[in-house]
Image: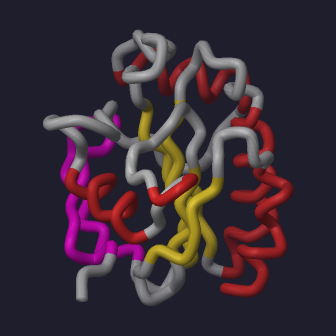
Amino acid sequence: MTTIADFTVETNKGEVLDLSEKLGNVLLVVNTASKCGFTPQYDGLEELQKEYAEQGFEVIAFPCNQFGAQEPGNAEEIAQFCKLNFDTSFPLMGKVDVNGPAASPLYDWMKSEAKGLMGSTAVKWNFTKFLIDREGKVVRRFAPQDAPKSIKRHIEKLL
């Protein structure tokens, strides 16, 4: 069976991150954008990061420009935007596609493990969230409109 440990991703600094390093932690993987109506969710994501980090929880953000071209910046611009406007401490990955032929293999796997509305595998918009347990398995998908604070009880069950 595949787990998150079977994937590597690129950080926003261009380094390879082996996600097997994240086993043992509860993860919330989110596709983000700086110019989206849901962008204020960065505040809620940072609150979750701060509240649960010591218990083995981490948010991992994947900037994505596939929805309304709402993430046009390069890695440095995105990182500066997140730090300046939301003082984020969670890791930002390199920009990815989450749908289509160039989709990140990690996203293809997560989408197949936790399908969306009516069995759809496609990510519908920015700030779709995937909750991963300590064993590296996808537990649940959350819609863009699901505020980070509404996910707390699901995170707490896994911690």
Looking at the picture, tell me which residue is in the foreground, 66 or 52.
66
* Placement of the N terminus among the 4 image quadrants: bottom left
Residue in view at x 24 percent, y 66 percent = 18
In this rendering, position of residue 44 left or right of residue 81:
right
**Given the current orientation, which residue lies at the most extreme front position?**
118
The x, y position of residue 112, in whole percent, is: 34, 64
Please tell me in which quadrant of the rendered image residue 28 appears: bottom right
Query: Can you say whether 60 is above or below 139 in the image?
Result: above
Q: Tell me if I can see residue 58 in this picture.
A: yes
The x, y position of residue 3, in whole percent, is: 31, 79
The x, y position of residue 128, in whole percent, is: 57, 45
Residue in view at x 73 percent, y 47 percent = 46
The segment highlighted magenta reads 4-22
Looking at the picture, tell me which residue is in the foreground, 48 or 136.
136
In this rendering, position of residue 144 left or right of residue 145:
left
Please tell me in which quadrant of the rendered image residue 38 appears: top right
Query: Can you say whether 145 is above or below 149 in the image?
Result: above
Query: Can you say whether 76 is above or below 43 in the image?
Result: above
Residue in view at x 77 percent, y 51 percent = 148
Please tell me in which quadrant of the rendered image residue 52 appears: bottom right
Looking at the picture, tell me which residue is in the foreground, 87 or 142.
142
In this rendering, position of residue 62 left or right of residue 57:
left
* Placement of the C terminus among the 4 image quadrants: bottom right
Residue in view at x 57 percent, y 19 percent = 34
Q: Does the magenta stretch include residue 21?
A: yes
In this rendering, position of residue 113 left or right of residue 156:
left
Q: Tell me if I can see residue 159 in this picture.
A: no
Circle count = 0
The x, y position of residue 87, in whole percent, is: 70, 34
